[in-house]
Image (spheres, grey):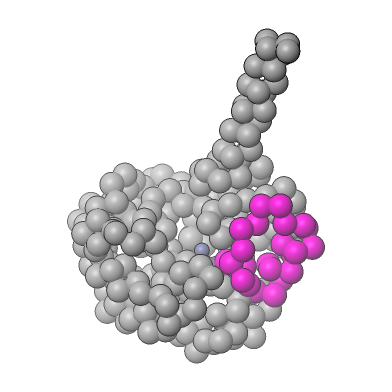
Amino acid sequence: MNWPLIIVILMIVGWAVGLLYYGVAVPDSQLLGRSLVRGARGGKRVALTFDDGPTPPVTNQILDWLKDAGVTATFFVNGKLADRYPECLQRMVRERHTIGNHTYTHPFLYLKTRGRMACEIDSTQDAVERAAAVRPRLFRCPYGVRWFGLFSLLRERGMVPVQWSDTGFDWVRKNRPGDIARLALDHIDDGAIILLHDGCGRHEPGEVDHTDTLRALPTIVSEIRERGFTFVSVNDFL
Ligand SMILES: [Zn+2]
């Protein structure tokens, strides 16, 4: 056996796998294409984003809370849920929130063909337009996972891929409201895009409980305001 050669091959394969993982899965990586990870500094602005909805009743509870607090947010919705709960999207538009595209069925996009990715994007654009008469400009990949061909598809449609700079990790079951707020606020800076959830990937709305996210919101919002930031839509960062 030629061990030196085998070791070199293993090192090259390991390096290639590491590079691929970085490009596909690390939220702020720009290797496969440019994504908006945070807004420009200087405006003292922060964007709050919610993924995976709409899933009543939690989406409505979050909308109630945001309305009372006077906070604008961005909701990256799944097309199949937009079709099921169009009234939630209508309310988002009415209350001046921004709707983004988060695919129709919330699949991992890696290894997906251009055709399948285009179908996920376009069917969601159509669902949002049917529900609320708007066509999203923003797109966020499920699980933050990007894939080859995605960026050209978005470019052709005039859409902007959006990742995030901060998150409360509210999809981790053990995280309670205090943990979600602490994690979301950990590294908050000018231009931050904060990821939270009002739904849960492929789970049915009845299986989703994001009341801990809702309970974390007052701390997150009041702390960010105390630091002198205002809340804006991700659109305001473009
Ligand atoms: Zn998601």
Front position in the image: 155 or 81: 81
Query: Where, by quadrant of the figure, is residue 231 drawn?
Result: bottom left
Quadrant, the N terminus: top right
Nearer-the-camera pick, 123 or 11: 11
Taking the spot 29% from the left edge, 51% from the top edge, the residue there is 183
Q: Can residue 28 be spotted in the picture? A: yes
Residue positioned 46% across, 80% down in the render = 205
Picture coordinates of residue 233, whole percent (x, y): 45, 64
| Res 13 → quadrant | top right
Residue 54 image position (x, y, % from top left): 48, 78
- Magenta highlight on residue 146: no
Q: Is residue 203 above or below residue 118?
A: below
**Magenta stretch?**
100-124
Identify the image quadrant of the C terminus: bottom right
The residue positioned 64% from the left and 80% from the top of the image is 127
Residue farthest to the right? 115
- Please state the horizontal and vertical placement of residue 44, each as a whole percent of the image: 34, 51
Horizontally, residue 16 falls left or right of residue 199, namely right
Instruction: Answer with left or right where residue 75 lies relative to residue 78.
Output: left
- Asked whether 115 falls inside the magenta stretch, the response is yes
- Asked if residue 136 can be seen in this view, the reply is no
Q: Residue furthest front?
A: 1
Q: Nearer the viewer, residue 219 or 79?
A: 79
